[in-house]
């Protein structure tokens, strides 16, 4: 079967991969590229655990095909920290203990990052609606929402 | 998916040729938020995906002499970011924005919501109320149909083999016009409509209704235009007698299913309640325009 050769940018690096027509971005990341930070939850766009950012938009990687990504800019959890320095969202998730099993966490961090880029000063209600596409079965969401609000405040503060 | 092929034509003609040659095993691919789920669940096993996103006209929102044209691959997120469109058709945009999460909004399209032919599709009653039409390209050329003629039964459209939707047309608005969409869901977000109501209103200078279209979703096999609503509203102001008649007309038009998300009795009652609420919102918007 014909494999497609795709050139894309992942976390700032040019990456070339070969994929089959039906392979999702989620499968490409995890099996072709060995980038296991993006998690596979439901595979049907309900849980948000595979959320990555493609061309500045948060999307479910399980609902995008690898073949669509020629020339695309992809951001995954692996590119979120700057070297050893955590992104403010990552740090606040630790500070607030906003994760337990961790499967939903990379997706929520990416969604929160994309959400705060559009709405840097959200209300609690806006954060909850913003994260409505991300399911978490451990935390009950409260700590996640507090961590995102706290990170937003820190990210707004003048450096 | 072993024998799946992927094509990304750059012209409508090339897409039609691919779809016609692919026959029943070919599928149009834009946002993929329904298609890839159906493939994943092995409800369908297509052998060819025709990605229409490389066709320029499917990606654009253009304001033309008589209407605004929304390309078939324009995403929900892009609709919501178009201020001019939001000002013209706030009800259509709010209906689209109720579909799924932010992640889904970044991919899902209004044309896909229509072609998935779910009776509960949120954007469809809003589009029917708006008097929208669908531009279809196919082996015999292009033609337009009203939105309400697209779905023929749950999951099935009137599209012939080789045909696909290239864009949706929403008519331009006079002043004193407004629209609205409301739905009932058991949750507050991320759910499928138990009842959906789209309303579009145009007012006369004296504040009476000049024209009205009301459409119901999720209460019959396909979303429907409630023709009686127009006769009840036109020529009148929005008083209790009119609202009562409107609620009855909406409830009378229902032939819903009974399922765990809503009984027949509940859906029928709620259709009337939401018809009144959505009409009030559309009316207020019309007064402000």
Image (spheres, rainbow, N blue to C red):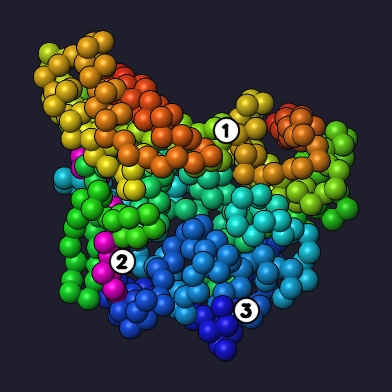
Residue B179 in the image: state x and y as whole percent. Answer: 29, 30
Q: Secondary structure at mark 1?
A: loop
Chain of the residue under the numbered disc 1 shown in the image = B
Q: Which residue is mark 1?
A: B187
Q: Are marks 2 and 1 in contact (CB under 8 Å)?
A: no
Question: Which circle marks residue B177 in the picture?
Answer: none
Q: Which residues are magenta?
A: B158-172
Q: Residue at x 45, y 40 (%)?
A: B258
Residue B171 among magenta residues: yes
Q: Residue at x 80, y 32 (%)?
A: A143
Which is closer to the viewer, label 2 or label 1? 1
| Quadrant housing the N terminus of chain A | bottom right
Question: Which circle marks residue A19 in the picture?
Answer: 3
Same-subunit check for callouts 2 and 1:
yes
Distance CA(mark 1)–CA(mark 3): 38 Å
Is residue A26 found left or right of B130 in the rendered image? right
Which is closer to the viewer, label 3 or label 2? 2
Question: Which circle marks residue B164 in the picture?
Answer: 2
Q: Is residue A45 visible?
A: yes
């Amino acid at each position: 079967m014909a494999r497609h050769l795709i050139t894309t940018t992942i976390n700032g690096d040019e990456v070339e991969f070969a994929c089959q027509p039906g392979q999702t971005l989620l499968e490409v990341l995890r099996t072709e590229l060995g980038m296991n930070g993006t998690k596979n939850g439901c595979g049907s766009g309900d849980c948000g655990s595979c959320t990555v950012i493609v061309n500045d938009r948060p999307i479910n990687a399980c609902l995008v095909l690898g073949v669509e990504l020629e020339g695309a800019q992809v951001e995954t959890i692996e590119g979120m920290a700057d070297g050893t320095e955590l992104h403010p969202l990552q740090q606040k998730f630790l500070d607030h203990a906003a994760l337990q099993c961790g499967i939903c966490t990379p997706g929520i961090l990416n969604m929160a990052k994309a959400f705060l880029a559009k709405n840097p000063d959200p209300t609690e209600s806006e954060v909850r609606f913003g994260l409505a596409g991300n399911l978490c079965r451990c935390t009950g969401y409260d700590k996640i929402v507090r961590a995102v609000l706290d990170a937003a405040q820190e990210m707004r503060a003048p450096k | 998916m072993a024998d799946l092929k992927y094509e990304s034509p750059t012209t409508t003609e090339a897409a039609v040729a691919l779809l016609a040659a692919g026959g029943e095993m070919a599928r149009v691919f834009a946002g993929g938020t329904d298609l890839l789920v159906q493939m994943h669940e092995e409800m369908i096993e297509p052998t060819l995906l025709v990605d229409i996103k490389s066709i320029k006209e499917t990606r654009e929102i253009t304001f033309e002499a008589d209407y605004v044209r929304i390309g078939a691959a324009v995403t929900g997120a892009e609709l919501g970011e178009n201020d001019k469109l939001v000002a013209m058709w706030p009800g259509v945009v709010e209906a689209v924005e109720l579909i799924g999460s932010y992640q889904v909004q970044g991919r899902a399209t209004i044309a896909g919501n229509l072609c998935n032919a779910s009776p509960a599709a949120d954007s469809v009653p809003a589009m029917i109320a708006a008097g929208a039409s669908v531009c279809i390209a196919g082996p015999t050329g292009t033609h337009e149909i009203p939105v309400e003629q697209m779905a023929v039964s749950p999951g099935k459209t009137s599209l012939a083999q080789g045909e696909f939707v290239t864009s949706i047309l929403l008519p331009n608005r006079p002043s004193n016009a407004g629209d609205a969409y409301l739905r009932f869901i058991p949750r507050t977000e991320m759910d499928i409509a138990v009842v959906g109501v789209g309303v579009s209103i145009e007012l006369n200078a004296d504040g009476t209704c000049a024209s009205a279209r009301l459409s119901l979703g999720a209460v019959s096999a396909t979303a429907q235009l409630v023709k009686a609503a127009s006769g009840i509203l036109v020529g009148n102001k929005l008083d209790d007698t009119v609202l009562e008649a409107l609620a009855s007309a909406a409830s009378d038009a229902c032939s819903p299913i009974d399922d765990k998300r809503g009984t027949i009795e509940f859906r029928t009652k709620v259709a009337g309640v939401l018809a009144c609420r959505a009409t009030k919102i559309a009316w207020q918007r019309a007064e402000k325009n």
